[in-house]
Image (tube, rainbow, N blue to C red):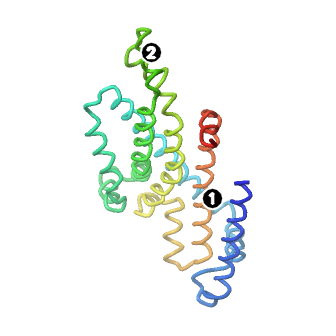
């Protein structure tokens, strides 16, 4: 039922887009029809979209892995050493509140090149995953923790057998949000001119040259990749944590 509702929502959005392009924005050129965008994408072909999407996706995946890996490691460290929680939380909030466009030029000067794109993708996902992992680790059942303690298990045993498993659903919830965020961070990094290829670079060039259909096509491809990333993580979450789906339906 949800899939049908989602499909209906997509059809309605496309129909609304087409209607506005043909009426309100007709003749202005700023909003092309879906047919014009598709025709432009077909004309550009894989030779244009393939390398640019691959460059952005590669940097986004690296940032996704680095940012989420660091967030999960910090969450585990905070659980083992509670005194570090205040510092870790403050750093996470700072990373979330600072605009990427504000720190991007500094990162570009320090690291340069593709490292800037990866860094911005990583910092875009750190906060969400850290909070999800921390909430999940703290949601462990108290009775299960006490049982591990009664049988002689220490802090590491409680973490391994109870808390990590309890944290999986909320951690995956954070990872699902992080997938599109990593792509957004990578595109912003490319906008800063730190790379010579990618969706962000192509978007900037097409805007400057007023290639409106291509701009919309690039935005559409970026949205599709972000949605695909979300769907992949959601599928992995469904396989790894099947019990969380049953709890959500109650």
Whole-percent x, y for residue 71 in the image: 40, 39
Quarter in which the N terminus is drawn: bottom right
Whole-percent x, y for residue 226 in the image: 57, 55
Q: Say above or below: 129 vs 162.
A: below
Whole-percent x, y for residue 50 in the image: 63, 57
Q: What residue is pinned by disc 1?
A: 224
Whole-percent x, y for residue 7 in the image: 72, 61
* Horizontal arrangement in the rendering, residue 222 relative to residue 112 (left or right): right
Of badges 1 and 2, the one in the foreground is 2
Which picture quadrant has residue 15?
bottom right
Residue pictured at 60% horizontal, 80% vertical: 31
SS type, badge 2: helix
* Horizontal arrangement in the rendering, residue 192 relative to residue 49 (left or right): left
Quarter in which the C terminus is drawn: top right
Could you tell me if the residues under marks 1 and 2 are in contact, i.e. CB atoms within 8 Å? no
Of residue 179 and residue 208, the one placed in the foreground of this image is 179
Compute the Cα span from label 1 to label 2: 45 Å
Mark 1, other Cα within 10 Å: few <14 / some 14–19 / many ≥20:
few
Q: Tell me the number on the disc at residue 148.
A: 2
Residue pictured at 51% horizontal, 50% vertical: 177
Mark 2, other Cα within 10 Å: few <14 / some 14–19 / many ≥20:
some
Which of the marked residues, 1 or 2, is nearer the chain's N terminus?
2
């Amino acid at each position: 039922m949800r899939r049908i509702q989602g499909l209906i929502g997509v059809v309605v959005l496309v129909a609304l887009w087409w209607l506005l392009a043909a009426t309100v924005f007709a003749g202005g050129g700023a909003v092309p029809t879906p047919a014009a965008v598709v025709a432009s994408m077909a004309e550009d072909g894989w030779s244009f979209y393939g390398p640019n999407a691959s460059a952005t996706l590669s940097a986004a995946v690296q940032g996704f892995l680095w940012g989420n890996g660091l967030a999960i490691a910090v969450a585990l460290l905070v659980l083992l050493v509670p005194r570090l929680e205040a510092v870790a939380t403050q750093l996470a909030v700072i990373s979330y509140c600072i605009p990427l466009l504000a720190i991007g030029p500094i990162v570009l000067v320090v690291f340069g090149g593709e490292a800037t794109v990866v860094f911005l993708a990583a910092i875009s996902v750190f906060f969400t995953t850290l909070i999800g992992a921390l909430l999940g680790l703290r949601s462990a059942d108290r009775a299960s923790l006490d049982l591990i303690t009664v049988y002689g298990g220490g802090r590491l045993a409680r973490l391994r057998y109870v808390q990590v498993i309890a944290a999986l659903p909320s951690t995956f919830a954070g990872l699902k949000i992080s997938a599109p965020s990593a792509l957004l961070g990578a595109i912003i990094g490319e906008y800063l001119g730190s790379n010579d290829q990618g969706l962000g670079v192509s978007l900037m060039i097409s805007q400057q040259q007023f290639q409106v259909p291509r701009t919309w096509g690039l935005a559409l491809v970026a949205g599709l990749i972000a949605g695909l990333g979300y769907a992949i993580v959601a599928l992995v979450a469904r396989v790894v944590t099947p019990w969380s789906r049953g709890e959500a339906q109650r």
